[in-house]
Structures are given as structure tokens and as C-alpha cells.
């Protein structure tokens, strides 16, 4: 089976499993797991932040960020395709008592104009916008990235308007690779950052919240409250560390293969995509309306798995288990089926 449903389907390699077994561990609720502590220091300094907190999932990291940056009754400005708006079970309304204001960006990305238009006049009866969420790279937006100058301008806009910035970087690794951005840059444009180890990096579990020391100290308490305090979790941190060392350099290959598939798809008469919009490992293409299920079934018969992604769109996501020979099989199957 060629599994393009998500970059979360990868299994830990033998070498990664060895690193996990050999990890030095301690009780992380006491702050005594050396492997976790080293990972938190390494990743936070990598992204130009003071401190980091290892958490079970990207959702927990995003929700901790909102908890830190918002007060109850605030409003969070986010693109309508954002993960926090679509795929986090409305957790922000429960955990932080905030309202999400989904703005109509382009391919999952916001602009300073959209933010300015969403601002309010501060009347008693209005919610108070307090945070901008930027997703980089986007997921539902099709893997698109913000450039460094986009982020700089957005950060300045946020400062002018008195807003905080949360960067949902579950795929920040892909974005920094695609835009050739030094990771420490991101710490200069965001108040909080989520990065995930379990997407394209291929670790079995784990994300990290990055921010100032003061905020991360508070986040530790909230993490505990949500049941995210873990014990000898260095075994998982070791997998994340292994992934940064050995899988991060492979992401550019995923991006190249995604682009190649996009060109193949653009030549299929029954499918549509603009290959220029494919910037990272995600390929979202269109089929004729009503043909999502039948298209997926035809692919499945060839052992190729993708996911429905809207009324007439399908998503294919590349990861390190999809090499050039798998790409060739997928490309040939799609040319034969949909030309
Ligand atoms: C996957 C994803 C998350 C959530 O990560 P989980 O580990 O699945 O909870 C958050 N944001 C984006 C953009 C994602 O793609």
C-alpha cells in the first residue's frame, strides 16, 4: 500500500527505535528527564525562544498557547482554513473561553489588511481581538508558506494593534526548508510557537510549545491540568531528537516529489491543480464535482491511499516512506486512470 493520506502515518525506523530504547530517562513531572530537558533546550534555542515544553500533541500545544495569550471573552483571529478552527474540536471555546474569528485568507494565509479589517472599536459589547494565529506551513491551505517578509510585516502589524502572534508550526520544519529560513528567525516574529515531531519528521509522538521562560513556566501548570504531565518521556523525546538529526534533511525530497506529482496531475484531463501552488509536501487537487469518492476508490484499487479534502478536492501528503519508486507508481497510475 502506498499511503499518501498523511505525513503522520510513518512508523519509527529501526534506528529511531534504538535511540528510544537507549534514552536516558527520569520523571519529567519532577523536571528530571535529561533527554526531555535537552530536547527542550535544543529546540527552543534553535527557534530563537527562551524555553520549550514537550507535549503529547500539536493540539495540546496550540491550546496551551491560546490559554497563555488570551483572557476569557477574547477573540482569536485565524484563517478560516486554520487547524485550530477546523480540527481541534472547538477546544479553544472550552479551555480558554474564547471566540475564533475565521477570516477569509488565501490558501490558508492571512494578510495585514485582513487583520486590520477585523479589528473592532473597543465598545463594551464587542469581543476583544487579542491573538493572531498564523499557520506555517498551512495544512488545509495546501502546504503554503509565509515568506520571512510576510511574517515580519505581520508581526509589526500585530505590535501596532496590540495583538499577540501564535505560530502554528506543526509543519514549521517544512516551511523553513521550503523558504530557506533560519529557524531562529521565527522566534523574532511570534510570541508562542508550536512545532510537531510527529508529522513529516516521523517521530511516533510529540510536539513542543516554544515561548518565553515565564510563559512556559505557566504552560507547565496548564499542561498538568489537561493531563499532559508525562513521566519517563525521554523515550519519546529521543525519537524527536533522532528525527531532527536524521529526518529534517529529508523534507526537501518530500517537497520535490510533491511538486513532481502536482505536474503529473496538472496533465491529467480529469483532474486539476496549479503546480505553482505546491510549496511543501502537501498536494491538494480538484476532481469533477461529485467524483471524490469514485476517484479515491479507483486509486485504492491500485493500492494508493489519499484523503477527501472538501466537496471536490483530494489531499495527497508526502513523507519519508514515499520514495522515488512509489512516486513513479503513483504518477503512472494517475496518468493511466485520469488522462
Ligand atoms: C496536525 C496539525 C496540528 C495538530 O497536531 P496533532 O499532533 O495531530 O494534535 C496542528 N496544526 C496543524 C497545522 C497541523 O497540521
Image: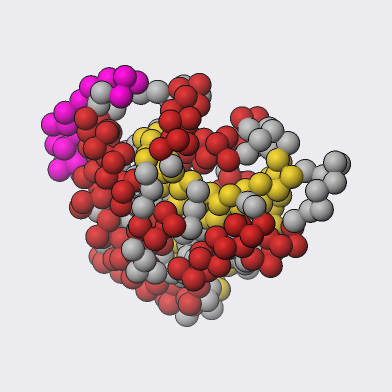
The answer to whether residue 291 is left or right of residue 275 is right
Q: Which of 114 and 137 lies nearest the eye of the viewer?
A: 114
Residue 287: give x, y in percent of width and height: 58, 67
Q: Can you give x and y, in whole percent of width and height, for residue 272 in the image?
A: 55, 73
Q: Where is residue 314 in the image (x, y as percent from the top left)?
A: 53, 59
Q: In this view, does 201 lie to the left or right of 101?
A: left
Give the left or right position of residue 109, taking residue 263 as reference. right
Residue 40 visible in image:
yes
Q: Is residue 295 above or below residue 269?
A: above
The colour scheme of the drawn protein is secondary structure
Q: Can residue 316 be seen in this view?
A: no
> Residue, x 27% and y 20% (percent of image)?
27
Q: Which residue is drawn at 79% across and 53% down?
A: 120
- How many numbered dots are placed on residues in this image? 0
Using residue 99 as the reference point, say whether residue 178 is left or right of it. left
Which quadrant holds residue 327?
A: bottom left
Instruction: Give the answer, above or below, for where 167 lies relative to 226.
Output: below
Q: Which of 193 and 328 is in front in this view?
A: 193
**Residue 134 magenta:** no
Residue located 69% across and 33% down the image: 72
Q: Residue at x 40, y 33 (%)?
A: 56
The x, y position of residue 124, in whole percent, is: 85, 41
Residue 145, compared with residue 304, is above or below; it is below
Q: In which quarter of the image is residue 93?
A: top right
- Residue bounds of the magenta highlight: 13-31
Amino acid at each position: 500500500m502506498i499511503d499518501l493520506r498523511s505525513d503522520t502515518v510513518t512508523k519509527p525506523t529501526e534506528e529511531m527505535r534504538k535511540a528510544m530504547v537507549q534514552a536516558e530517562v527520569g520523571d519529567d513531572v519532577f523536571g528530571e528527564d535529561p533527554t526531555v530537558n535537552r530536547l527542550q533546550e535544543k529546540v527552543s534555542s534553535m527557534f530563537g525562544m527562551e524555553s520549550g515544553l514537550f507535549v503529547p500533541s500539536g493540539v495540546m500545544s496550540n491550546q496551551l498557547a491560546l490559554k497563555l495569550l488570551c483572557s476569557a471573552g477574547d477573540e482569536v483571529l485565524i484563517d478560516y482554513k486554520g487547524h485550530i478552527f477546523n480540527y481541534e474540536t472547538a477546544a479553544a471555546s472550552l479551555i480558554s473561553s474564547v471566540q475564533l474569528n475565521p477570516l477569509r485568507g488565501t490558501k490558508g494565509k492571512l494578510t495585514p489588511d485582513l487583520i486590520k479589517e477585523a479589528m473592532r472599536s473597543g465598545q463594551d459589547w464587542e469581543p476583544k481581538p487579542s491573538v493572531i494565529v498564523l499557520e506555517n506551513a498551512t495544512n488545509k491551505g495546501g502546504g503554503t508558506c509565509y515568506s520571512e517578509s510576510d511574517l515580519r510585516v505581520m508581526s509589526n502589524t500585530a505590535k501596532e494593534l496590540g495583538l499577540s502572534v501564535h505560530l502554528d508550526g506543526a509543519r514549521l520544519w517544512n516551511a523553513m526548508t521550503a523558504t530557506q529560513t533560519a529557524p531562529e528567525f521565527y522566534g523574532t516574529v511570534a510570541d508562542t510557537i508550536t512545532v510537531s515531531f510527529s508529522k513529516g519528521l516521523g517521530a511516533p509522538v510529540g510536539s513542543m510549545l516554544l515561548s518565553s521562560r515565564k510563559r512556559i513556566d505557566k504552560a507547565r501548570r496548564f499542561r498538568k491540568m489537561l493531563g499532559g504531565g508525562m513521566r519517563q518521556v525521554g523515550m519519546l523525546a529521543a525519537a524527536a531528537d533522532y528525527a531532527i538529526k536524521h529526518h529534517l534533511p529529508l523534507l526537501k525530497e518530500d517537497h520535490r516529489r510533491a511538486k513532481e506529482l502536482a505536474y503529473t496531475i496538472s496533465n491529467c484531463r480529469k483532474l486539476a491543480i496549479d503546480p505553482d501552488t505546491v510549496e511543501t509536501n502537501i498536494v491538494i487537487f480538484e476532481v469533477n464535482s461529485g467524483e471524490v469518492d469514485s476517484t479515491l476508490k479507483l486509486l485504492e484499487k491500485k493500492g494508493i491511499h489519499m484523503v477527501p479534502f472538501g466537496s471536490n478536492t483530494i489531499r495527497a501528503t508526502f513523507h519519508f516512506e514515499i520514495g522515488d519508486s512509489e512516486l513513479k507508481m503513483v504518477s503512472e497510475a494517475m496518468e493511466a486512470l485520469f488522462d
